[in-house]
Every structure is written in C-alpha cells, then in structure tokens.
Amino acid sequence: MRIAVMAAGAVGGYFGARLAAAGHDVTFIARGAHRDAIRRDGLKIESALGDLHLKDVNVTDDPKQVGPVDVVLFAVKLWDTETAGEQTHALVGSNTRVITLQNGVDSVERLAPILGDDATIGGATYVVTTIARPGVIRHTGTIAKVHCGRLDGRPDAVLAGYVEQMKAASIDITLTDHMRVDLWKKFVLLSGTSGITASTRQPLGVIRDDADSWTVGQNTLIDYRWSGGNMDDTRKYATELVALAPDVLFAPGSSAVGPLRQATRTVPIVFVLVVDPVGSGFISSLAHPGGNITGFTSYDYGIGAKWLEVLKEIAPSVTRAAIIRDPAIATGLGMWAAIQSVSPSAAIEVSPVNMTDAGEIERAVAAFARSPNGGLIVTGSALTILHRDLIVALAARHKLPAVYWDRTFVAGRGLVSYGPDTVDQYRQAAGYVDRILKGEKPADLPVQAPTRYEL
C-alpha cells in the first residue's frame, strides 16, 4: 500500500514506521526539527515491542509532493483538524481512506465536510508514545492497537482490504461496525486520565506509581456496561453490576441512576448529567443528599426557557416547536412540563415528540414539519445521543431550525446548542469517586450544579 502519515508525530510516526518496516510505501508529513532529523538520521522507534531504525525515510512537509495514496493516517492535534484537512486534499484519490487517529469524538464530523464522507473513517488508538527527541519516538508499555470503522456501521470493502494488509504487517488493528461506541469508550477513559495528568502536570506513569493513586489492574478494577439507551438492558446491567459488589458505581444520566438505585440502597453511586435529582427522588437535597447517591447536575428545568429564547432569536418566524424527549425517564416528563409552562410567553406553540426508536422519531418529525414556521428543541437523554445523527439529519431535511442540549450535536452538524460543559462533569465525578474510595460517604458530599454554560 501507499500510505501517508499526516502528521508524523508520536502516534502517527509510530504506526507509520511499523508499516514502513513491513515493506509498505510510507511517506511521513512532518515539519521543523523533527522533519530535519528524520531526513538526516532516519526515524527511530524505541519500544518494548522491538526497537526500529528506518534509515531511508520518505519525509516531506508538503503533501502536494506525495499525491493520492491508499491510506492516510490522520494524526494531527484535534485543534488543527480543519487546517490539516485542507492540506490532506492532495493525498486523497477515489479509493483513499483517511483514518482519524485523534482523541475526542468529533474528528470525523469535522473532517468529512472537507474530504468527503466516503474517504473519512473513524479511528481510535490505544498507545502511549512521545517524541523523545527529534527523529526518535518512544513507545511506553506493550499496547499499540487501533480500532477503525465507519460511524454509521456500513460495510466498506475497500477499507476492509486495507485493514487486512495492515494486520499482515503485524499492526494490531480491528475493523469495527460500532465505531461511535468505541470513540465514546475512549473518551470516557480520557476524561479521567487527562484531567488528572493536566491538573498534576505529570505523565500518567508518575501518577500510576504514586501510592495514593488508583491504577487499573493493580489496585483498581473497572467493570462497565453499555445499554445503548435500551431500558430493559439498562435494568439488567444495573443488577449485574450491583451483584459484582463494587465499592462505587458511576451513573451517567437519570436513565442509569434510576435502575441502579432500584438495585441497591447501600453501594455508593456517583452520577453526572442528571437534571432534577431531588424531584426524581434520588436524593433528599443538593446540600445534603443523604443515602448512597451524590453527583453533578447538568442543569435545572429553567433551561427550557433559554432554549425557547435561543430558538426564537435564531429563527424569529418560528411559532411552533417540537420538543424531542424520552418519556420513559423523569427528565423527559419534567423538561416537557417546564417548556410547556413558559411557551406562551415566547409565543411558541409546543408539542412533544416521544422517542422509543428511530422509526417513531422520523415519523413524528416528518408529521410536524408538514405545517410551516416550525422548529425543534432536543432535550437531554441517552436516546438523543444514540439517535444524534438521525435527529440532525431530519432537522436539515425538513429545514427545521433546532436547539440542542449538548455541543456534540453541533459537532455532528447541528445548528446550535446551549448547555453545560459536560466533559468537566466527568472530571469532577472522578474526584468524588476518589474521595468515596478513600472513605468519605456520598451523603456527606453535596450535589453540585454547573457553573459554566456554553452556547
């Protein structure tokens, strides 16, 4: 295969070097001192999986000199996605697949409008590498694997062929049909580790070796379940997790807290992204939760008025709004009631769109869109995340201005969102988990509300 590494930093350089050593035609896109060192001395890999020194390396800082290739390993920093994406145009041909090896969950949504949906492939890496010095990449540990696949799960024979060739080159790579789930799994992992490394300004290895830290496989074991918004599975998995007798449970959202609370009144539970924990019966009060549950609220029902206000500001002609909600959870019912109560003051007639499956959402939105001057408000739940792409696509298809509860919808080409910094909630929840594991009681840890909202 012809492969281009855009750009040849620690991650891209590592996998590119392994592929070059296996005989593939690899060009490294690099700049500055790293590029100059590779040109002069070659590219070196220091790794417990085997050291490597490529002495004759194709390296350039101009993708136009390379031309179309079979595979682009897209490994730039996330903030540089759009700029690097424009430069990557020169590397893309009719059968090119650009595999994003970046952290985060929205790189495909940001890159696909530039390079095309067919060319852009989701990817997640599990590898710890650093540039030890220009021209030298150091790999720590023995894990170096890649998951890749299309976000919509559709088969891709061209990509499958490239993956098989990478496997033959001893790259630990998996072609998956649930790439979005894999991206979020890694995101959740990084939400904890990145917060710790950033706040302490220490690499993960130093933190791991600290006697007071928690290390998976040494003094910590993490079990997790993913229900995909299916409440029957959520209840089943809640029972399974409680049966494991954990020291603490983590619950993202009301749909997870409710089943866990039904399964145990003794095991500590830390939640995030819950709208009304008092009204839902999870806790006694924010200041004094009582019982075995504490955590971080996402917002209160008053945010519904703000969503209506934003909708009216971006689309003054809107007189009707469909409220997409999950009626199976207390948040869905409570948020609908709150929005309904303030809608007359905004001069907007509201109607609910209940979610159970994709078909129901599509039919309800299509029926709503038959009348003019409509807009959408999408409230928070696991199901709205699960059906994000469908909801955003329906809003575009029916030309409905939409306000979403979280920025992940805007990353997926939605119009506008207003809500709290959800990533920060996960970071803070890690702190509560740590305190509980060290002996504090959930009843003594106040439930905290967000202090910053993002438009």
Image (tube, rainbow, N blue to C red):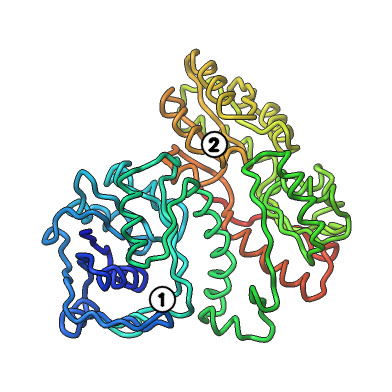
Query: Which numbered disc flags the more N-terminal residue, 2 or 1?
Result: 1
Name the mark on residue 387: 2
Name the mark on residue 331: none
Residue at 82%, 63% (x, y): give it.
Answer: 245
Q: Give the amino acid type for the residue marked by disc 2 in the picture.
A: His
Q: Position of residue 207 (x, y in %)?
A: 59, 81
Residue at 57%, 51% (x, y): give it.
Answer: 453
Q: Position of residue 196 (x, y in %)?
A: 58, 73
Which residue in the protein does label 1 denote? 129
Q: Quadrant of residue 380?
A: top right
Q: Position of residue 182 (x, y in %)?
A: 51, 54
Task: Check contact, mark 2 vs mark 1: CB within 8 A.
Answer: no
Disc 1 element = strand
Crowdedness of circle 1 by 10 Å Cα count: few (<14), some, many (20+)?
many
Q: Quadrant of residue 424?
A: bottom right
Crowdedness of circle 2 by 10 Å Cα count: few (<14), some, many (20+)?
some
In the figure, 233 relative to 361: above or below? below
The answer to which of 372 and 360 lies nearer the viewer is 360
Image position of 75 (left or right of 390): left
Image depth: mark 2 or mark 1 in front: 1
Image position of 416 (left or right of 213): left
Residue at 57%, 58% (x, y): give it.
Answer: 423
Residue found at the far front of this picture = 168
Q: Give the amino acid type for the residue marked by disc 1 in the picture.
A: Thr
Disc 2 element = loop
